Image (tube, rainbow, N blue to C red):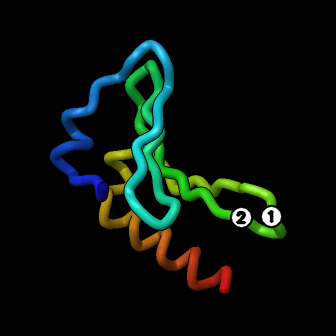
Amino acid sequence: MALTDTAIRKLRPTDNPFKLGDSAGLYLLIKPNGSKLWYMKYRIDGKEKKLAFGPYPDVSLLTARQFRNAARSKMR
């Protein structure tokens, strides 16, 4: 299910870090200290890698999706 800005703002940290997926490899990592960081998961030569886009709200949901789309187009 795609994330919304409202849902992201309402997220509260837990004792353990957790991930919330958006789409096409984009996800938000929520850490116990309350920080929220954007990442994109992808594979190259069968190995899983991740690309960091920055913290939310400095990097908005829309911007993170644009970064993901740009990164995916360069990988093709």
Vertical relation: 17 (above or below) 10: above
Res 43 label: 2
In the rendered image of this protein, does residue 71 appear above or below residue 4?
below
For image coordinates 47% across by 76% down, the residue present is: 69
**Depicted 13 relative to depicted 75: above or below:** above
Residue at the left extreme of this rendering: 6
**Direction from residue 21 to residue 1 in the image, left or right:** left
Q: Nearer the viewer, residue 26 or 9?
A: 26
- Name the residue: 60% across, 57% down: 41
**Residue 44: horizontal and vertical position, in percent?**
77, 68
Neighbours of disc 2 within 10 Å: few (<14), some (14-19), many (20+): few
- Quadrant of residue 75 within the rendered picture: bottom right
Question: Are circles 2 and 1 on residues that touch, CB within 8 Å?
Answer: yes
Where residue 55 sits, quadrant-wise, is: top left
Picture coordinates of residue 66, whole percent (x, y): 41, 73
Mark 1 secondary-structure assignment: loop
Residue at (52, 56) in percent of width and height: 53
Camera-side residue of 1 and 39: 1
- Image quadrant containing the N terminus: bottom left
Residue under label 1: 46
Name the kind of residue labelled 1 in the image: Gly
On screen, 18 above or below 74?
above
Viewed as shown, does residue 51 lie left or right of 64? right
